[in-house]
Amino acid sequence: MKSASLKATAAIALCVSAAAHSGIAVGHGVNGSLGKKRSATDVYQVTCSDEEGGTTPSYRLMTRVRDNKPKRRPRVSVWTIKDGTTTKTTDTNGDGNARYSAETHNDNGSGVYVMRVTKSRRDAENYSVQFHCEGPPSSGFIHTGTDIIRTQNQ
Amino acid sequence: MPRGGCDNLSHVQAGPHDIGLVIAKLQVAIGACSMTVHERRLKGAGRILGLLVLVSGLMPWNGAVIASPDLPPGAPLDTRPFGAVDIAFHKGFITLKVTRASWTGVLAEFARKTGVRFHYAAAAPGVVTASCIGMTIARALECLLGDDTSLVLRYATERSGARPDPLPTEVWVLGQPGNDGERNRMATQSPSPRAGSAHEAATTGQDDFAMIMEMTASGDPDTRERGLGRLAVSGNPTDPAAQAVFRAALADADGSVRAQAVYALARGGGPQSVHVLRDALRDADMSVRLMAVDSAEADEPGTALLHEALADEDETVRVAAAIKLKQTASAHLD
């Protein structure tokens, strides 16, 4: 799993250590679980910033989700919300395989995106979400600064 | 099917925010009407029972003041500029692909393609991007509007009493279409109060510690769960009062509440959190055990807990533990 671009601070090691205690997921993917309740939702804040070590600003946030084993009825979705724009993608490629949902992009530049993982029915689910911030088309959608914290775990 | 009792439905009225009252009145009215009613519990503002109302023939419905404006089929699209809206409807299934389009524009096109008549108060500002492929109308609406939006769907039955037409003729959207992100705008500290949840809505900037503590003591387990979750990520999770609340919640009767308590206490880390997680792995409710796995650290005690969870009776818990162990192993190799 690729490491997320973290700001180059002297306390990176401390941040990584603290991450495990405060719900910060390091890397461009998160694995999680949603409890039995139909309304169970995990919420993250993804912060898109300039390309680390460069000047390319963030242009959009890419996300896709995978419904992991076991095979259960709920469908898992990932939503992103920023500045009045909502995107959603659902894994309709089957439960418990290696395939992710289609990618979705929220084109709202740098800043904080709220990312939610939901499911369609009652029953617990395991999921994986891939995400990264990307630069503008002129940059070839280069990966830019991406930080994430989890703000709700159900 | 006798019509006399069904006439009561035409007099059901409520304000746009009296959602629970509307449903209660509908239940009473429908009880007096010889119709088949399918209750379907949906998540929404308060505890709401969504009704799939099967009626014989068209029913007059001129009294339900739930929402406006109506969007009859064939209505002109929203005049505001909107992005790509591609909706195909074939043999009862919808494929919908929307890119940065206004909510009213999307619903108008949805109505135009399907013939469904929508009723809602007002759509949220902003745009939506969504992809919902090969779904029934009801599922496509859940996909588009969000899992937390409650719907009332009205179907028409054939007079012969044969199986009802699976296509709804009218849909009431309870709440504000496009408001699914409301709770998340709250998380980003953008004020956006919603009827029925104003008490929970965060004012600009700060979560109210006292309000959150009050939520954790609610008689409603969903409210307690939300309160614990917010307390866990607030600026005061180490407060002695908060810690006492988390520990007390470990014995809550509701599994989801106990799971939040586990999550909150595990965030603090350290030996005490290991004890909490170990006890949680023995909880009778799989949601609690799943939360224990999700909260386990990538250290030696956490890894031991995850190995223990590989033998859980529930497959979801076992798989979650396996994924986490694999992730931990990959991280160590990097």
Image: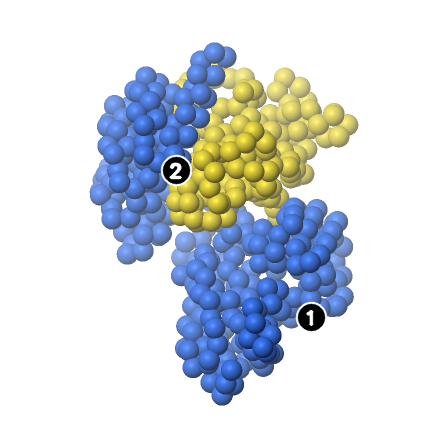
- Residue B278 screen position, x and y as percent: 26, 29
Using a 10 Å C-alpha cutoff, classify the residue at mark 1 as few (fewer than 14 neighbours), some (14 to 19) or many (20 or more): some
**Residue for point 55% across, 26% down:** A28
Callout 1 touching callout 2 (CB < 8 Å): no
- Residue A14 screen position, x and y as percent: 42, 18
Q: Is residue A38 above or below residue A22?
A: below
Query: Label 2 belongs to which residue?
Result: B233
Numbered label attached to residue B187: none
For residue B297, what is the image quadrant?
A: top left
Q: Is residue B270 above or below residue B16?
A: above
Element type at marker 1? loop
- Residue A13 visible in image: no
- Residue B99 screen position, x and y as percent: 70, 46
Which chain does yellow denote in the image? A
Q: Amino acid at mark 1?
A: Pro
- Residue B88 screen position, x and y as percent: 72, 54
**Residue for point 39% across, 38% down:** B233
